[in-house]
Amino acid sequence: MVLLATGAILGALLADHVPPFYPHGLFIVRGFFGLFVFAGLVIAGIVQRRRAEWRKRLMLCASIVVIAPGLERALPIPDMGPNWPSMTDGLILVLAAAGPIVDLVTRRKIHPAYVWGVGAILFAQIAVDLITASPLAPALLHLVGAH
C-alpha cells in the first residue's frame, strides 16, 4: 500500500494529472501525510494484534485516513469554494469521531486507542495546513521534479 500510494502521488504530480482544483503543494503534502498516518496506525494495529480492542480501533482510524482521497473525488469540490480542504477535513473528523462516540455511549468511556488514532488524524490535518502554507511544500515539489 505504501509503495503503491507513493507511486500514485508522484505519478500524478509528474504527469500533471492532479485534479484542477487541487494545488500541487497541498496534493503532495496531504498525500504523504495521509500515507504516513495510515502506515503508522496500521503498524500500531499490528503491534497490538493480541489486544483486539486496541487493534480494531487503530485499524478503523487507519481506514478513515484512506477514505479522504475517495471522499474528495466524490464531493462537488469545485462548487465548494476555496475552503474545500477545511470542509473535507471536517468530514473526516466527523467520521473519526463516530468510534469514540459509540464507545462513550456503549462503554461510558473512550478507549485510549481512539485518543491515539483520532489524535494522529487531527495532528496530520494541522501539520498539512502548516506545511502547505510554508516554503516546504514548494521545496518538496521541486525535489520530486513537479511544479
Image (cartoon, helix red, strand yellow):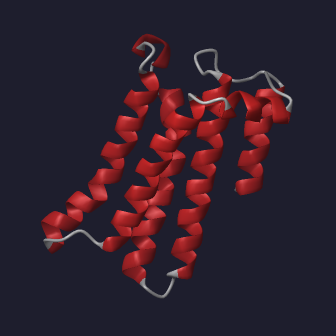
Q: Quadrant of the C terminus?
A: top right
Q: Residue at x 64, y 20 (%)?
A: 19
Q: For the view shown, which residue lies furthest in the front direction?
A: 135
**Front-most of residues 85 and 15:** 85
In the rendered image, is residue 5 in sight? yes
Q: Residue at x 68, y 34 (%)?
A: 136
Q: Is residue 98 left or right of residue 107?
A: right
Q: Is residue 119 left or right of residue 31?
A: left
Asked if 35 appears above or below 138 in the picture, the reply is below
Q: Residue 144 appears at what percent x and percent y? A: 83, 35
Asked if 60 appears above or below 125 in the picture, the reply is below
Q: For the view shown, which residue lies furthest in the bottom direction?
A: 50
Q: Residue 66 appears at what percent x and percent y? A: 54, 48
Q: Quadrant of residue 139?
A: top right
Asked if 20 appears above or below 43 in the picture, the reply is above
Q: Residue 98 appears at what percent x and percent y? A: 28, 53
In the rendered image, is residue 70 in sight? no
Q: Quadrant of the N terminus?
A: bottom right
Number of residue marks: 0
Q: Residue 48 appears at what percent x and percent y? A: 50, 81
Q: Residue at x 86, y 29 (%)?
A: 145
Q: Residue at x 58, y 16 (%)?
A: 21
